[in-house]
Image: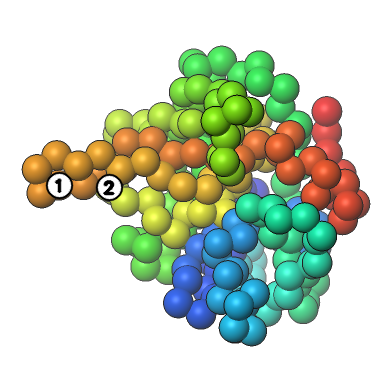
C-alpha cells in the first residue's frame, strides 16, 4: 500500500480536483477531463505528493505532453523530478477473475485533500461496440463507507503491485433523495497502449 500511496498525487487544475500517478520520475498519468481547464484556459496543473516516505509534501507543476489523437488519458510532464520508484504498468488481457481483489488510491472530494484507498473487483469487460472511454466496470467493496468517489478520476487501479488501469467515472444509483456510488469504471492499460508507447512508457505484457 505505501508504495502505491507514495506515487499518487492530488491534482488541482482550475476548478477541477482529481488524481494523478507517476509512471516515471518525471511523467504522470491522469484523466484528460481532470486537466480540461489547462487545455481550454491555460490554467496551471498543480500536483501534490503527500505520502513519500521520509519527506514533507512535494508540490510541483506539470504540463500536458502533446498527443495527436483524442484520448481520455493525458500524460503529464512534471516540472520537477520526483525521486521515487514508480509502479509497474501491466497490460491485462482480460483474464483477471471476479474473485481477485484490486485496489485504487486517490483523492475523492468528500475527503478534502486526504487520500483514500478503495478495494474493488472486476464486474465486467465491456464490448468494444459499447465502449466510449472506460472499458471495464468494477464493483466497489460494500465495506467502503463513502458514497461519492468524484475526484478519484485518474487513480491507478492496482493488481499484484502493477497498474492495470485508471479510474475514469462512477456509476450513481438514486434511491429517493439519496444518491450512492454503486460501481466505478476504469480504462485499461491495453486500451491506451498506443499513447504509452508514444511517450516510451514501458508496459509489461
- Local SS, label 1: strand
Residue at image x 55%, y 64%? Answer: 34
Q: Which mark is residue 178?
A: 1
Residue at image x 74%, y 60%? Answer: 75
**Which mark lies nearer to you, 2 or 1?**
1
Residue furthest to the left = 176
Residue at image mark 2: 147
Residue furthest to the front = 129
User: Is residue 184 shown left or right of residue 81?
Assistant: left
Residue at image x 38%, y 36%? Answer: 183
Q: How far across and down, in percent of the image, does residue 154 sit?
A: 57, 54
Which quadrant would residue 30 be assigned to in this image? bottom right
The quadrant of the rendering that contains the C terminus is top right
Q: How far across and down, in percent of the image, does residue 116 sit?
A: 43, 52
Q: How far across and down, in percent of the image, does residue 156 sit?
A: 60, 46
Which quadrant would residue 63 be assigned to in this image? bottom right
Camera-side residue of 25 and 186: 186
Q: CA distance from mark 2 to mark 1?
A: 10 Å
Amino acid at each position: 500500500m505505501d508504495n502505491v500511496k507514495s506515487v499518487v498525487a492530488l491534482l488541482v487544475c482550475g476548478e477541477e480536483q482529481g488524481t494523478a500517478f507517476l509512471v516515471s520520475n518525471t511523467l504522470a498519468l491522469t484523466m484528460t477531463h481532470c486537466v480540461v481547464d489547462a487545455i481550454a484556459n491555460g490554467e496551471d496543473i498543480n500536483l501534490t505528493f503527500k505520502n513519500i516516505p521520509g519527506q514533507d509534501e512535494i508540490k510541483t507543476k506539470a504540463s500536458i505532453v502533446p498527443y495527436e489523437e483524442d484520448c481520455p488519458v493525458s500524460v503529464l510532464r512534471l516540472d520537477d523530478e520526483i525521486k521515487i520508484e514508480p509502479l509497474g504498468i501491466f497490460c491485462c488481457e482480460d483474464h483477471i477473475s471476479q474473485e481477485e481483489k484490486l485496489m485504487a488510491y486517490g483523492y475523492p472530494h468528500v475527503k478534502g485533500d486526504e487520500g483514500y484507498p478503495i478495494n474493488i473487483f472486476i464486474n465486467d469487460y465491456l464490448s468494444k461496440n459499447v465502449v466510449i472511454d472506460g472499458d471495464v466496470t468494477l464493483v466497489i467493496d460494500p465495506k467502503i463507507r463513502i458514497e461519492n468517489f468524484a475526484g478519484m478520476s485518474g487513480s491507478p487501479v492496482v493488481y499484484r503491485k502493477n497498474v492495470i488501469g485508471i479510474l475514469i467515472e462512477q456509476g450513481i444509483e438514486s434511491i429517493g433523495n439519496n444518491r450512492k456510488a454503486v460501481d466505478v469504471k476504469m480504462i485499461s492499460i491495453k486500451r491506451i497502449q498506443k499513447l504509452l508507447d508514444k511517450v516510451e512508457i514501458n508496459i509489461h505484457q
